Image: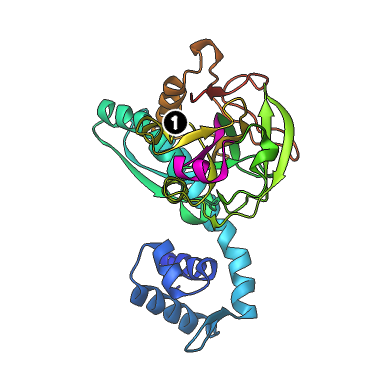
């Protein structure tokens, strides 16, 4: 019986998932030429064309799609077996692959990662910046942090809400001199704004109660908080950011908090991970260090994660009824 090269099958699955040889090769962590050769070998062995290739695009054939749907779950199961087998070891080592928005990584994860790496010299961390919720299985992430101002969408991943990032409103002194000092949220109507890609309206909360909502059409829309910050400093519009993120600009007088008696709805930060039965020691150590850094009480800790139910608030690492660590960023 002819030996089956399962690596070729795995690369084939990655090319399907990546929508082409370039992205598929990146997912498989092989050169593009190797991915192309692997698929060609597989097509030769099967006597069937798996992809339609043109100069502009690569499209999986019907036969290729049928094979992918049967084979891909098997490789997913093998990766789960490998991860669970590795979790039996108590040694904190290897590489943790994490995806996170820039603000979360720079403001909240750095202390945890630095502390963990000092404690475990054989541990390595790959930190990728991503504002969208990535496919953990497809991209091989152990953990992914996502931000939202609503509840997390239904997910088959285990999840935990780890922090609330409070937000307030800021503008450059030059813009305030031009427009006048606002006394109420209604006074900001008509002001130029700098916002997130998802911003269509801003909520104004007083004592945690929403008192006003304002429609916004930002002049600059970006998930990158650094870009929004610089635009606000240059007087291009009022913006909504974390007080911690603008601390230096406030001290230097480059920004002023507008309507200091009001805040906006906080961003909820969740951490997602594949719903494995056993957690790798390195991931468990990271989550424990994260809770210690964010101030979750020792008595509230729980060793496992539960998958989030459809339409329900995701389960916490701590008691399911407990509030997450809230960073009041004043």
Residue 109 location, x and y as percent? 40, 34
Residue 65 location, x and y as percent? 62, 73
Q: Which residue is mark 1?
A: 244
**Figure check: 136 above or below 52:** above
- Residue 174 forms part of the magenta stretch: yes
Q: Nearer the viewer, residue 135 or 51?
A: 135
Residue 218 location, x and y as percent? 59, 54
Label count reads 1
Looking at this rendering, what residue extends furthest in the bottom direction? 55
Residue at 45% across, 68% down: 24
- Residue 41 forms part of the magenta stretch: no
Visible in this render: residue 320?
yes
Mark 1, other Cα within 10 Å: few <14 / some 14–19 / many ≥20: some
Q: Nearer the viewer, residue 94 or 153?
A: 153
Residue 95 location, x and y as percent? 34, 43
- Quarter of the image with the N terminus in it: bottom left
**Figure check: 46 above or below 229:** below
Residue range of the region highlighted in magenta in the rendering: 164-181
Residue at 47% across, 89% down: 55
Choose top left, top right, bottom left or bottom right for residue 62.
bottom right
Choose top left, top right, bottom left or bottom right for residue 208.
top right
Question: In the displayed structure, does residue 177 sit left or right of residue 251?
Answer: right
Visible in this render: residue 2?
no
Residue at 43% across, 62% down: 27
Residue at 42% across, 73% down: 22
| Secondary structure under the numbered disc 1 in the rendered image | loop
Choose top left, top right, bottom left or bottom right for residue 265.
top right
Q: Nearer the viewer, residue 195 or 74?
A: 195
**Figure check: 295 above or below 264:** above
């Amino acid at each position: 019986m002819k030996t089956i090269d399962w690596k070729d099958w795995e690369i084939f699955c990655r090319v399907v998932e990546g929508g082409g040889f370039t992205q598929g090769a990146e997912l498989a962590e092989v050169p593009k030429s190797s991915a192309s050769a692997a698929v060609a070998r597989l097509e030769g062995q099967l006597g069937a064309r798996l992809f339609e290739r043109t100069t502009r695009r690569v499209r999986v054939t019907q036969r290729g799609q049928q094979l992918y749907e049967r084979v891909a779950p098997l490789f997913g199961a093998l990766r789960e077996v490998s991860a669970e087998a590795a979790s039996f070891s108590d040694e904190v080592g290897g590489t943790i692959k994490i995806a996170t928005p820039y603000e979360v990584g720079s403001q909240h994860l750095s202390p945890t990662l630095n502390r963990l790496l000092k404690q475990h010299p054989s541990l390595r961390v790959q930190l990728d910046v991503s504002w969208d919720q990535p496919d953990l299985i497809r991209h091989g992430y152990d953990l992914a942090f996502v931000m939202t101002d609503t509840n997390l969408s239904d997910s088959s991943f285990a999840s935990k809400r780890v922090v609330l990032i409070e937000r307030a409103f800021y503008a450059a002194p030059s813009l305030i001199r031009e427009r006048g000092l606002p006394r109420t949220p209604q006074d900001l109507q008509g002001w130029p704004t700098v916002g997130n890609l998802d911003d269509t309206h801003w909520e104004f909360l007083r004592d945690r109660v929403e008192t006003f909502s304002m429609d916004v059409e930002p002049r600059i829309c970006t998930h990158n908080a650094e870009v929004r910050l610089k635009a606000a400093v240059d007087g291009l519009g009022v913006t909504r950011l974390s007080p911690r993120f603008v601390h230096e600009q406030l001290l230097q007088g480059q920004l002023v908090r507008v309507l200091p008696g009001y805040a906006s709805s906080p961003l909820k930060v969740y951490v997602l991970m594949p719903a494995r039965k056993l957690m790798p020691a390195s991931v468990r150590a990271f989550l424990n260090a994260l809770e210690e850094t964010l101030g979750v009480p020792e008595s509230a800790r729980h060793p496992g994660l539960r998958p989030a139910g459809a339409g329900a608030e995701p389960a916490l690492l701590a008691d399911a009824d407990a509030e997450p660590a809230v960073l009041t960023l004043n």
